[in-house]
Image (tube, grey):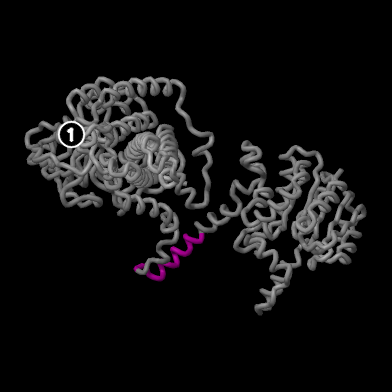
Amino acid sequence: MSPPSPRSRCSHRRTSTSSSRAPSPRPRANRSGASRASPRGLYLGQFDLSLIHPHPRPEPERREHGEKFLAELESYLRTVDSARIEREARIPDEVFQGLAELGCFGMKIPVEYGGLGLGQYYYNHALTMIGTVNASVGALLSAHQSVGLPEPLVLAGTEDQKRQYLPRCATGAISAFLLTEPEVGSDPARLRATAVPTEDDSEYVLDGTKLWTTNGVVAELLVVMARVPKSDGHRGGISAFIVEADAPGITVHRRNAFMGLRGIENGLTSLRNVRVPRENLIGREGEGLKIALTTLNAGRLAIPAICAGAGKWSLKIAREWSNARVQWGRPVGEHAAVAHKIAFIAATTFALEAVVDLSGMLADEDRKDIRIEAALAKLWASEMGWRIGDELVQIRGGRGFETAASLAARGERAVGAEQALRDLRINRIFEGSSEIMRLLIAREAVDAHLKAAGDLIDPHVDLADKLKAAASASGFYARWLPQLVAGKGDLPTSYDEFGALAPPPALRRAHQPQAGAKASAYLGDLGGLSQRRTLQLLDLRGTGDSQTPMDAASYRVDRQVDDLEALRSHLGLERMDLLAHSAGAALALLYAVRYGDRLRRLVLVCPTPRDDGMPHSKRRLLARRASRTPQRRPSTTRRTRSNRKR
Amino acid sequence: MRSAIAHLDVPVLLIAGELDVALPPRPAAAYASLFPRSEFAVVPNAGHSPWQDDPRGCVDTIARFLD
């Protein structure tokens, strides 16, 4: 199955992504022949366990390298004065210096180009750690590396461009990504900036205005998105250019001020007759959006990483304050209302970190297109980060609403809970707003079906084309539907390596919730028997599909007989005991007939099968369906139904 | 099925509930007699789920059979 074509357009840090149709940039994983995106597989009913099992882990040498760097970073970050960054609304020069010396500007840049070559996993960890100290520093580094010049160059740059610019980026030449314009946010395809080739084709002349240029105020290098007009020898379209920030014609008009992330250098930049050499085009003309989008696929993971950091910090503050603050004679953390908030922060932070780690490893392995994973992670992390910040402010009460500087001025501990909340707010807006993320994710869910059958429901398609669409759609569904009922999960020996956690389907079905009430009754009251490894078969009617338990499709006795046999060998029993109740006897009898020599003893408790192995109630149902007249349900059936509901 | 069961060389225990309307004791006894090697037990005052009506008696009967 080929990877889906990405359907979103994206923009830089300060903007969001739309889901309008764009030419399909090949996701990164695609180039290395990697397999499909797994969430798409899930939408199609295909569970790809290889994503999480075996759980990806960093290779040993990468691990050693990464851990060493994180230790250095941690000791450096202890010297960073976060309060000063907030107070002065800028990151001090010595912090830039210190970060550059550690190599923080080249964490993801490959070693051969002067970077640390950490990979997404350790880059994420570094951002998480930075996120516990100051969100503006996190934004500085991620705007530079996740969406600034390094990532597009690694993805689509020529060898010359990489050699020329990556070492500069790695040593601290800050870069910024200029896509958003005053009129263009979530729909960057409409951007107005132009790049007109000169007569001799040696240069492009750039004109336009760019807004919310994170790092743009201090950057040395800019990635500028501009539209090349179509002409002879020029395919035209939105294209990406490397621009020196001190090139004539570039003016930073002002530095913007925001609710949070006060330390970021983000401004309004105009380009007037800026001449850029032809060699500075990244990729080809018209590939700008594709490059931006692909960059953001992994680039978005910076946000969950920073949110995980904010969560860790919030947990620490919440814990400490809830122990120190006493009301009604007890630390407030012992009052349930506050305890719940702490539990929420702790659990969510744990989950955030797990999501960040897994997504980072998947990105590093480069075997999957992680577009949707990253979108899921970005959406969820930014929303949860905000809730965590909000709960922390609530736990801190009036002190949560008060600034750290004010707290310090009256002699209390300087804890900027309100700052954390303000800093976290932007995560729901930039790098693809939550709304755009939802569109992107939902689009993925229906995309395969729209492709297969979209013309059928499109009112603008005429009948002939609808017939054509119907033919191709039935081809798709003829291949797809059988997978739903005969997937790997239905094979008796699949997932064997999980032992007792993944019993064969017969037992799994027996433990489905609708059979739960009965299962516990058996396993509880007959606990002594279960230790004898007597296999207990529940009422068959409780083991099929819960909605249509009596349907022929779910009445798959024949297959369950083979499941049972697989279960016997799975349990390592030479001969087994079977205990069956009610309609479960049908299965037990079929098993006994087919595999009698593997059966030691058979117990039938109130069996209800007929000679043909079909339960009475099945027969009644079929009869009722045939006559189509409602009948009073016999009492046994009614009881079974109510049992199932319980 | 009937003929296949008639040749089943496996000890079978059939437990019926005295008050089970799905399979009352008499047809249950007939059912049990279809098996060449069968035992038959009726749990008194029990319905379709006899282990709930008489846990001890039920388990004892089954345990004795399985030992």
The spot of residue A328 in percent (x, y) is: 40, 43
Q: Nearer the viewer, residue A23 or A129?
A: A129
In the shown orientation, is residue A254 left or right of residue A71?
A: left
Quadrant in which residue A452 is drawn: bottom left
Q: Which of B4 and A265 is in front in this view?
A: A265
Q: Residue drawn 31% across and 26% down?
A: A107
Which quadrant is the C terminus of chain A positioned in?
bottom right
- Seen in the picture, residue A471 relative to A42 is either above or below; the reply is below
The spot of residue A273 in percent (x, y) is: 7, 40
In the shown orientation, is residue A16 left or right of residue A349?
A: left
In the shown orientation, is residue A239 left or right of residue A327?
A: left
The spot of residue A608 in percent (x, y) is: 78, 62
The spot of residue B31 in percent (x, y) is: 87, 62
Q: Label 1 lies in what chain?
A: A
Q: Is the magenta region chiefly helix, strand or loop?
A: helix
- Seen in the picture, residue A595 relative to A245 is either above or below; the reply is below
Quadrant in which residue A430 is drawn: top left
In the shown orientation, is residue B18 left or right of residue A345?
A: right
Does residue A356 belong to the magenta stretch? no
- Seen in the picture, residue A246 relative to A268 is either above or below; the reply is above
Residue A195 in sight in this render: yes
- Seen in the picture, residue A599 relative to A357 is either above or below; the reply is below
Q: What stretch is highlighted in magenta?
A: A460-474
Quadrant in which residue A409 is drawn: top left
Q: Which of A313 and A172 is in front in this view?
A: A313
Disc 1: CA contacts within 10 A as few (<14), some (14-19) or many (>=20): few
| Residue matched to label 1 | A87
Q: Residue drawn 69% across and 49% down?
A: A506
Q: Which amino acid does label 1 sit on?
A: Arg
Q: Nearer the viewer, residue A547 or A613?
A: A547
